[in-house]
Amino acid sequence: MVPRPPCVTELLKRDPPPVSLSNLSDTKNPPYRADLSDQIASPMCHPALEAALHLMNDDLFSAHFLLRKMQEDEWAKWLHGILHLIEGDLEKNAKLWYQQVDPKVLSTYWGADDPAAAAIENMYRVKRIKDGEEKDPEEDKKARRIKWEELTSIMESLEKEHGWDAVDGTKFYTKDEDPSHQSLVMKQNRRDM
């Protein structure tokens, strides 16, 4: 069994990031720690686990590249919702992705009653903060903490389920994104890599 990579420990030390990143161009919105980007990709772990780490590092571009290829995976759908929440694309994408996640999976963090409704309620809390409608600093802290705990909870669940062993990530790809999908993250239909 491969141990947890050091980059995970480094990411878990950080304070909860802002509720939403304002500018999503690659140069104006760099990862939290650019020095961790290669370390995140190097273990060749399950691609949903790698995507969670990229999101924890505020690297939306790398996370989206992986997530758009796993549109049938429940964990990837959830992470995809978080990605669009972070970028501020709430109505068109974040809400849709949250609604598509199997409630049993979402309930691992959001509880069993109506997990999608709880996640979407938090999404609107983030929107009110981002739009300046909510000015209470305690609400901002709460939203940041909830979003961070949600993301780290997914990472830990994926870690438990898949571990850190090297895998061929392409075997987990289910379908690529619809060509008509216009992501705010990518500013285009595809990412050249």
Image (cartoon, rainbow, N blue to C red):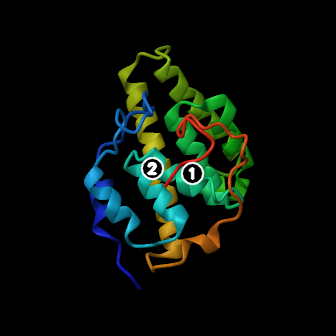
Identify the residue under disc 1. Answer: 79
- How far apart are the two marked residues, 1 and 2, measured between alpha carbons? 8 Å
The x, y position of residue 117, in whole percent, is 69, 38
If you read the primary sequence from the N terminus, does the residue marked by circle 1 or circle 2 appear first?
2
Q: Nearer the viewer, residue 114 or 8?
A: 8
The x, y position of residue 4, in whole percent, is 35, 72
Q: Secondary structure at mark 1?
A: helix
**From where the camera sits, is residue 59 visible?**
yes
- In this rendering, position of residue 66 left or right of residue 97: left
Residue at screen point 37% across, 36% down: 29
The x, y position of residue 55, in whole percent, is 45, 49
Please state, as top left, top right, bottom left or bottom right, where the N terminus lies in the image: bottom left
Residue at screen point 67% across, 29% down: 91
Residue at screen point 47% across, 22% down: 129
Q: Cβ–Cβ below 8 Å for labels 1 and 2?
A: yes
Q: What number of labels is visible?
A: 2
Is the residue 72 above or below the residue 129 in the image? below
- Numbered circle sitting on residue 55: 2
- In this rendering, position of residue 45 left or right of residue 29: right
- Locate residue 37: give its quadrant: bottom left
Is the residue 162 above or below the residue 23 in the image? below
Going by the numbered disc 1, the residue's amino acid type is Leu
Q: Nearer the viewer, residue 137 or 11?
A: 11
